Amino acid sequence: MDKLVSCIVDYCSDFKRRPISISSLHECRRRLIDVVGCGLSAFHEDATVISRKTASRYESNLNGVFPNVLGVELNVAPEMAAFTNALGIRYFDGADTFPGGGGHPSDCWAGLIAVAQHADADVRSLFESVLISYEVFYELFQASNLRAKGIDNAFYVTVSTAVGASYLLGLSKESIAHAISFAVVPNVSLGVARTGELSMWKAGASANAARNGVFAAMLANDGMSAPALPFSGERGLFQLSDSFVMNFRKEVDKPRIFDAHMKTYLCDYHSQTAITVAKSLHGKFSACDIQKVIVSTYWFAWNEVASDPSKWHPKNRETADHSLPWIVAGVLMDGNFSENLFTSQRFNDPILKDLCARVVVKEDAQLTNQFPHRMPCRIEIFLKNGTVLTETMDLPHGHPDFPMDDETLANKFLMLATQVMAINKAEDFLNHLWVLDLSESCRTLFKHHFVHRRLDI
């Protein structure tokens, strides 16, 4: 067995003996509420409609065995439930993240829920699998830095989901090793999914990763064997990347789930502080009075959301919600962040397009030195009369040092869910998630909480 595989297997196998605090279980509940809200909000988007159509080909009447698709009365194979639910969760880019190239551990939730429902696992077991997945995700990301090799962060989702799903299925050490190999060998995904003008596959890459993680664990559960040395073997991953080791912490006060940054706004994380700064500057000028806007930020933010010319001319939401100049220009004009920034009407708005063209984004070395512990942003607005307005912020709401409280999270869920269901139904769903008993079957997670009861509506 690969030494790296052995390290992950040992961590997963020993997890049952680790104490889990009440605060950790509560944090899992909070993240569940967050991902469900994000998934519901994207219910009517073209990409999620397509994913449900695809998933419906794997439909089953065995409601007690096949998992639910979020928001609709549809039960499908676990792999396809993972795919369509993960695509909805990721589509608006509103769930948690490990900034700096880590991607979104929240993408693992859909796959783990699907396996938990399939296996009739209880809520506590689901939460334990989530804690494992976040740990594996974080340590793999920190150790490997695969982004530098052109490998997409969806790779972390596949491996972490496979490990968490293996835990839910109660796999032996040998079978977990096979599941990890099945996650690694066929699933080295390319970072082109998140560069240039973006497509629906920005969310689809994460959904596919969740699906592949589930499939890896299911194959291992059924007895399929996998390559023994997916990392260190000849033509293994280490021949595409530098070799690396993972070091799991033995005793911790707070698991890695607390280190995943939550989002206030449904867009790329590196725009979160800029949105707050732009909101504070709104109303102090007219758009026609602006000569130029300089946004100073850290290198990773510049590279991720402001280094490509397409960011100044977005034609779809996928590109626009990863465009720092577009988001800053829109919030400076509107005074708030909303889905209104991502409509076809706004993409053709001459005033907004003109203001966006006057936005300059540059790296500031001093701000780069603060990342990833801080997410600093400075906006300077130069008016035609010579006045310069400046605002700075370094922590977005949802950062581990500026956490989102339960009330704010509940308001976020209701804001998202009421885009597709009545307020009373959204409140009922929220209350259901808050009071889930840890011994309750995961098959009740989405029960009776539908946007529609028929797939074709």
Image: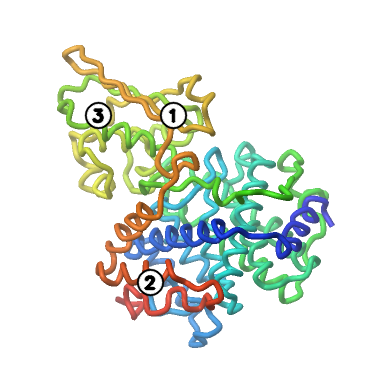
Q: Can you tell which of label 1 and label 2 is closer to the viewer?
A: 1
Q: Is residue 197 left or right of residue 451?
A: right
Mark 3, Cα crowd under 10 Å, few <14 / some 14-19 / many 20+, is many
Q: Secondary structure at mark 3?
A: helix
Mark 2, Cα crowd under 10 Å, few <14 / some 14-19 / many 20+, is many
According to the image, label 1 marks what residue? 376
According to the image, label 2 marks what residue? 71
Against 353, is 416 above or below?
A: below
Who comes first in sequence, dot 3 or dot 1?
3
Residue drawn at (29%, 32%) of the image? 278
Q: Is residue 213 left or right of residue 371?
A: right
Against 451, is 7 above or below?
A: above
Viewer can see residue 310: no
Cα–Cα span, label 2 and label 3: 38 Å
Q: Secondary structure at mark 1?
A: loop
Against 83, is 242 above or below?
A: above
Q: Is residue 25 left or right of residue 223?
A: left
Who comes first in sequence, dot 1 or dot 2?
2
Labelled pair 1, 2 in contact (Cβ < 8 Å) = no
According to the image, label 3 marks what residue? 281
